[in-house]
Amino acid sequence: MSSQSLTLPRAAEPASRRPRRRGDARAALAFLLPNGIGFVVFTVAPAIACFALSLYSWPLIGTSHFVGLGNYQTLFTKDPTFRAAIGNTFYFVAAYVPLNLLVSLGLAVWLRGYSRGRRILRVIFFIPVLTPLVGDSVVWSLLYTNRNGLIDSVIHAVLGVQGPEWLSAPQWAMPCIIIMSVWQGFGYNMLLFTAGIHAVPEMYYDAARVDGASKWRTFRSVTVPLISPSLYFGIVMTVISSFQVFAQAYVLTNGGPGTSSTTIVLWLFEKGFNDYALGYASAIAWVLFVIVIIFTFVQLRLQRRWVHYEV
């Protein structure tokens, strides 16, 4: 008997299941379509228009003309303020992201073992995230006021010395912005990490205690690997948002003194809404977009080495 005669025919899919699958696909498309249309209209189309605009010298009032990559060439060869803005932005990211993660993760771990008033503390820590960023910046500008601000008053009362010119000294302007930004933004990651920690099964901590693991070893070998998806998400979102820092620098220092606290988005704002150089500002926006894409892609590649997803 030939081998073909031994092959059994596959059971035909019930006819009633095929229409159901087509109906599910239509329902999914109906739910996705509004968001997809909004994404195309309000994200994809403006991004394409922004790139097209970056190829022109396009003043708000006057005649526009095509310059090709001239705006990008000017950015990197003839605009020292833009180069300073890139350095300041990377300085902000390099300091803000680790500090934000350190504070938020540390408080999330502390709140896990703190039972009394834990819910109230979470709300208190999250309040700065909900308050307007401009309002937070105005309050901190009053705290940083020399000789009359709260920070200077505390330093003088405790140490008996006068604080530096917080927002007027080039070496202190960006650290002041970083400190204020950490205070304002750590609550989001704290809640994210808290949710991840509470999702870790208690049996892993029990096993670590039985094995005699210290608190640090338990944190490093149990907590961090099991909340690595939450850590990865928090890192990606924090890096993206930190590259877009604007309001803090605009309100606290307006980019000064000099260009010591000018960021990429602040310089984009200055060129687009003060100088009305729309094509030039669009080029700055696309440079920032490429930087964010590169960092996000690098994090996507690196997450395969340290992020552990449950199977």
Image: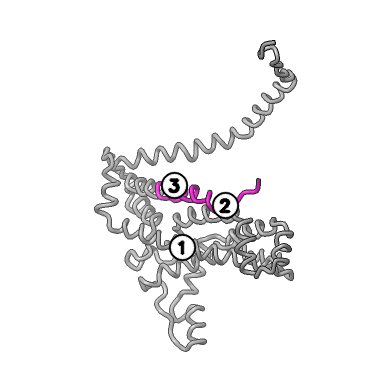
Q: Horizontal and vertical percent for residue 232? A: 55, 53
- Asked if marks 2 and 3 touch (Cβ < 8 Å), the reply is no
Sort mark 1 into few (<14), some (14-19) or many (20+) by Cα contacts within 10 Å. many
Distance between the alpha carbons at the discs numbered 2 and 3: 20 Å
Callout 2–callout 1 Cβ contact below 8 Å: no
What predominant SS class does the magenta segment belong to?
helix
Q: Of circles 2 and 1, which is in front?
A: 2
- The residue where tag 2 is placed is 307
Q: Residue at x 51, y 66 (%)?
A: 99
Query: Residue type at mark 1?
Result: Gln
Label 2 SS: loop
Which sits earlier in the primary sequence, circle 2 or circle 3?
A: 3
Q: Residues within 10 Å of mark 2 (few under 14, many from 20)?
A: some
**Residue placed under numbered mark 1 in the picture:** 248
Residue that label 3 marks: 293
Q: Reply above or below: 305 against 97.
A: above
Colouring rule applied to residues: one colour
Distance of label 1 from label 3 (alpha carbons): 23 Å
From the image, state whether disc 2 or disc 3 is nearer to you: 2
> Along the polypeptide, which appears first: circle 2 or circle 1?
1
